[in-house]
Image: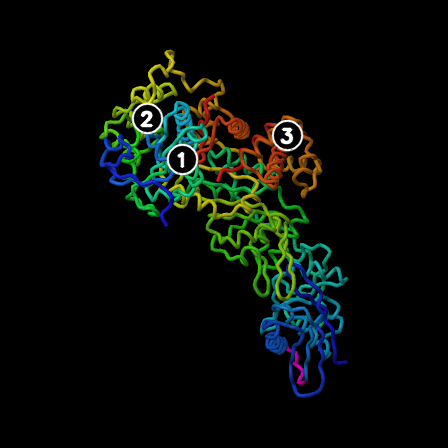
Amino acid sequence: MIPSGFELHLGDAGYPVHLTTGVRPPVRLLGMGDPSALVPGLAIIGSRRATPYGLTCARIFARCAAESGVTVISGAAIGCDLAAQTEALDAGGHSVAVLGCGADVDYPQRSASTLARLRAGGGAVVSELDWGATPLPRQFPSRNRIIAGLSAVVLVVEAALPSGTFSTADSALDAGRDVLAVPGSILYAGSAGTNRLIRQGATPITCVDDLREALVCAGLLAEGAVPAAGGNALGTSSGDPLLEALRAHPMTPDQVGEAVGLDAAVTMATLARLEAAGLVARHADGRYGPCLPG
Amino acid sequence: MTQAVVPSSTLVGVEAIAVEVQVDVSAGLPAFTIVGLGDTAVLEARDRVRAAMRSSGFDFPNARVTVNLAPSPVRKHGTGFDLPIAVGVLAATGQVPRSVLGAVSVGELALDGSVRSVPGMLAHAIVAPLRGLPLLTSGDAVRAAQTVRECEIRGLGSLGNLRAGLPGVAATSSTAPPPALTEPDFSEVRGQSSAKRALEIAAAGGLGLLLVGPPGSAKTMLARRLPSILPPLDDAEMLSTAVVHSVAGLDLDGVLAGVRPFRAPHHTATTAGLVGGGTPPRPGEASLAHNGVLFLDELPEFSPAALQALRQPLEDGYLTLVRAEGRVRYPASFSLVAAMNPCPCGYLGDSERTCTCPPTLVERYVGRVGGPLMDRIDMTLRVGRTDTSRLLTGSTEEGSARVRERVVAARERTRTRGLPRDLSGAALLRACGLDTETRRTVEEAARLHRLSGRGVTRLLRVALAIADLAGEERLTRPHILEASGYRGHS
């Protein structure tokens, strides 16, 4: 059964023009949802093994894009991708998911509800593969070139080395798109990829205004959308030594307790208080790291 | 008179029930039959009894010998009926004085006539005084059986000694101090301050703990040291623990020295091995850990059925096995300490090695333990490896004795607090008398960690243990906060 979707062929009238300037534009693009959502936008991509820091950055910048009327493009993968796309929808914006399987397949399973919202009109879900195609590892790098092709700017929020986000960034550079990256701790292996991108010339994004400026440069936002003052830093000092220590570098309770000189009981109680306030969150590996700014 | 009735007992679960061994010797074709639902071991008593009597210089009657084990409907197991059957035949044929019938006899016979002890001696020793009778058993079972002070024990080395009637009351074994057991001590663990704190709380509140960490993060080492900070066994606990160990035929030295048992079944353990079962039913590891610590290493590797079977003892403190031959109840009130790797490869979050597991696989691995069991574990904690440099420095760590003092004091305060152990949910919340701020903290924690009603109860129990350790009457916000830090780490 062929699902009710749309089918765009290279050279057709409806085929997104900007995609033809990308690397190896797909001959045929199958999709579900709203084909008019396929306008140049901001790709937000990042690690599947995201830390709370990476997820928070993905959300902050996706919301900024959505509120500025810029479409967020990503791959609907667990982690940064999904966080960015869900947040864009929640903020009332549009989003496009490019899948490494058929556009009607819910993969990964955890993204199913977000994919359903996209297909229902929050944007579009597209793929160059046949309807019902199963996800195979080799299909994802070529999927990444479509993400790069559909976007005007690519933002990498968190990536390790090696990382699949590099193939997207490479395609973006080959197609002449801007690549942005959120810097991370130089001590954390999970941030090595984004830091490498910055060293290679990607624009570092450290606050919402940095992103707006980049969107203006790419022609996605009108000039004047960025307040002249600019540089609204996200990090403000809280005065809590334990919180500041964790913002500098995520640590286990034992490590941070030792670093700020608190015993195990007080450390645990303080961490729980910060966690309840949404200021820190647990990483998958048991360390505590920064979450919401504030 | 050619009949004799010998009091004896048999095990059902960890309890001994009274059995009468009725022996009838009458004229007819020579035969030796045992009736009354005995298993193979009981029926084999015929050959052991005949040989043991001959070796001890007695005559086996050249007549028709019938033995009935009453009450007949109860299935009887094991070799403990050897001695009472021999005593009955000897008394019926007048080869020993009939005074020997005035004791509960339990023991196995060797072919040379010597008497051997059987599993569950302690259970038999508990029941004998209730019938107002002394216990006649092997000499080597005396020391263990003397744990039951009410019981008068007559030790019998060999069947031949019965010619003069019942042997005298066994002397109370010289109260030589039990061999000093060197238990592993907390001071041997370097660093790991939050894990030690969690164990202290678990010990104070009698709570279950799950340690999650990569290989080499001292999970087993930490768990092995929990008994050393638990208060020593009191007399009642010692007896109930010793009975289970006795029924399982295990060494009692550790338990009788007041050391709480530490059981660490391998993850290939079957459900029966873990919670008891088999024919005849035997106590499982959960019961052997009664009043002690049950340590389940590599928790997700255990069979789901075995883990689910642990839910009843975790809630109720005992296990009920329902089998064709009846219900058996085993005590199983233990502190659960479980350990697991954070992911299948084991290195998620390790400071030196990189984890190679895809995130979905990690989730499936953690999910294997099952929500209902996880919900019954009071505290979870991530542990990491201590830096090598730290391991080699001679820094002094607090010893178990100091921690135990705090735990004992906290348990004393728990007792004076007097909250019923089974209080839960709203009732417990009311009994804690929380102020508005503390109550709001509980609600926040419940939302953050998506706690069920049972989860909230566990959170409060952990917080109560923390308050008791701190010596504070009222439950306040810091206690709740710290307690919520021990949730949701898996």
Query: What residue would you read off at disc 1?
Result: A82
Q: Marks 2 and 3, how far apart in space?
A: 43 Å
Query: Taking B3 as reference, is B300 above or below it?
Result: above
- Does label 3 lie on the same chain as label 2? no
Q: Outermost residue toward the top?
A: A229
Q: Amino acid at mark 2?
A: Ala
Closest to the observer, B98 or B12: B12
Query: What residue would you read off at disc 2?
Result: A181
Residue lying at 38% horizontally and 20% vertically, measured from the top left = A207
In contact (CB < 8 Å): disc 2 and disc 3 = no
Between tags 2 and 1, which lies in front? Answer: 1
Q: Position of residue B110 (x, y in %)?
A: 59, 71
Q: Marks 2 and 1, how far apart in space?
A: 18 Å
Q: Amino acid at mark 1?
A: Leu
Q: Quadrant of residue A84?
A: top left
Q: Position of residue A108 (x, y in %)?
A: 39, 42
Q: Is residue A175 visible?
A: yes
Q: Secondary structure at mark 2?
A: strand
Q: Secondary structure at mark 3?
A: helix
* Badge 1: chain ID: A
Q: Marks 1 and 3, how far apart in space?
A: 35 Å
> Which is more N-terminal, label 1 or label 2?
1
Query: What residue would you read off at disc 3?
Result: B439
Q: Which residues are magenta?
A: B57-63
Closest to the observer, B173 or A194: A194
* Crowding near the residue tagged with mark 2, few <14, some 14–19, many ≥20 C-alpha atoms within 10 Å: many
Is A267 displayed left or right of B439 in the figure? left
Is B138 displayed left or right of A149 in the figure? right
Q: Secondary structure at mark 1?
A: helix
On residue A202, which mark appears?
none
